[in-house]
Amino acid sequence: MSRRGSDKSSALLALTSSALLLPAYQGARADAPPEFMEAGMRYSKYEEDNTQGKKTFGGSSQRYDIDAAQFHLLAPVADNWAFALDVQWEDMSGASPWFVGESASGEPKVIMSGASIEDTRTEVSVTTRYYYDRGNAGVNYVRSDEDDYDSNALALDGAFNSSDGLTTYGGALSFSADDIEPTQGSVPTNTLKNDKDISSAWIGVSRIISTRSLLRFGLSFTYRDGFLTDPYKLNDNRPDERKEWTISTGYRHFFDAPNAALHADYRYFDDDWGVGSHTLDLAWYQNLGDLTQLIPYARYYSQGQADFFGNLVDLSDRYYSQDYRLSSFGAITVGLRLRQELGNWVVNLSGERYRTDESWGVYNGDESPALVDYWRYSFGLDYIFR
Amino acid sequence: MNVLRCLVCLLLAFGLCACETVEPWERGALAKREMQWAPDAMEISLQAQINASKEASSGGMGAAGGGCGCN
């Protein structure tokens, strides 16, 4: 029954204006609110590998483990509105790289913070969206609470269709006010209390380029202003503003014979700290019958280091950081997702591996001894109220 | 300069591709769930958050939104 309903719905969408809209950040149903209420949850386990003993003072050390739970509710309201509620909880424990020192043989080695960090985060996001004949407009508010970090963000976005329905133009603006109050423990912090603001703008256009393929293109600019130094890292002093640009493109193609869709996305990132990066995402959505979908995916990422990054820094410089996240490295993610429909229920399972190495990147730079590798597993259930 | 070069290339590619008219009744495959830009919003948002907390770059899928103390 549910399958027939779904097919009927897809056919109807294909023949009505709902299917003509393809905003760059959503899907093919932008000019109509959702037909049914939808609810979903995910539980994810994130586990970082221990640091390598040969790169760590005191031997191998445990890093972060994080449990994350997500809840999502999307409901149609009246004829032209939709409301969405998203809640995310995270519980984190473990150790983080504190600073990098030099061994007797001159090798950089990392000193960990000790397995004393415990934190929880709760994020609540509410969105209301209005759908009109040729697009939609939305308002989103997000509040994130941690023991040592609070954030309040407001975002506005909209999408507009060309008259032939082949092209969709989109745009978004967001503003965020963040407060930082580091937990005082055994590790000295770089500030007692501080704040930062984040302003961001994005424009995008997507286009139907054939009966089986879509292409999109987007530009974004983000300005961060305030305390951008990591409060918990010993040798860390960063500029108090950062300007970031991204150029991104995406491609979707449906193949009839294997009954599968290819997703390809690329992003170029550049900023005024000297960081540049390339990101390529590929995924293959393989349908196995009407109810099962298997999704293998891979991601390649390469970044160049910030101008002020160094394993061994000069504290008389104006800016300096030993944070591995500002170093040059390459990263590869491979993962597999399974999506199984069971009537109105959908079961989602996924697992992925993320690995880093300085030699995998396209940029030159010093290899940080603190690069991170991790595993992530996820289980989820969705329900459609039809 | 790099940004400008990428921008020009992408715009050219986009312009060259945008030349076929697809009638509404030919868009059935495009309406499938697996053809959406982000078929699983919860998965995409968690992945983006993890990547942003472990790498120096983020964004590109929309406006940046708020931050977190994730490290």
Image (cartoon, helix red, strand yellow):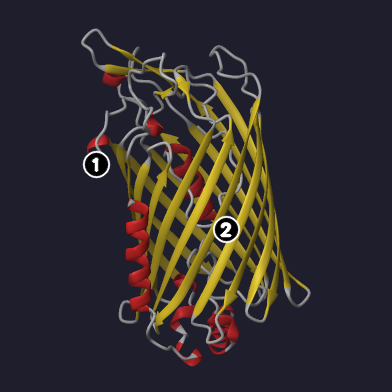
Which residue was labeled with disc 2?
A381
Helix or strand or loop: what does disc 2 sit on?
strand
Chain at numbered mark 1 = A
Q: Residue A16, can we see it? A: yes
Query: Which residue of the protein is positioned furthest toward the front in this rendering?
Result: B1
Spatial CA distance of label 1 from label 2 is 36 Å
Q: Residue at x 58, y 36 (%)?
A: A225
Q: Which quarter of the rendered picture does the N terminus of chain A lie within?
A: bottom right
Quadrant in which residue A361 is drawn: top left
Q: Is residue A334 visible?
A: no
Q: State which chain disc 2 sits on.
A: A
- Contact, mark 1 vs mark 2 (Cβ under 8 Å): no
User: Residue B37: horizontal and vertical position, in percent?
Assistant: 47, 66
Q: Which mark is residue A360?
A: 1
- Across and down, in percent, residue A341 comes to 52, 68
Q: Choose the circle earlier in sequence order: 1 or 2.
A: 1
Q: Amino acid at mark 2?
A: Leu
Callout 2: few (<14), some (14-19), or many (20+) C-alpha neighbours within 10 Å? some
Bin the neighbour count of mark 1 within 10 Å (Cα to Cα): few under 14, some 14-19, many 20 and up: some
> From the viewer's perspective, is the residue at label 1 or at label 2 nearer?
1
Amino acid type, label 1: Trp
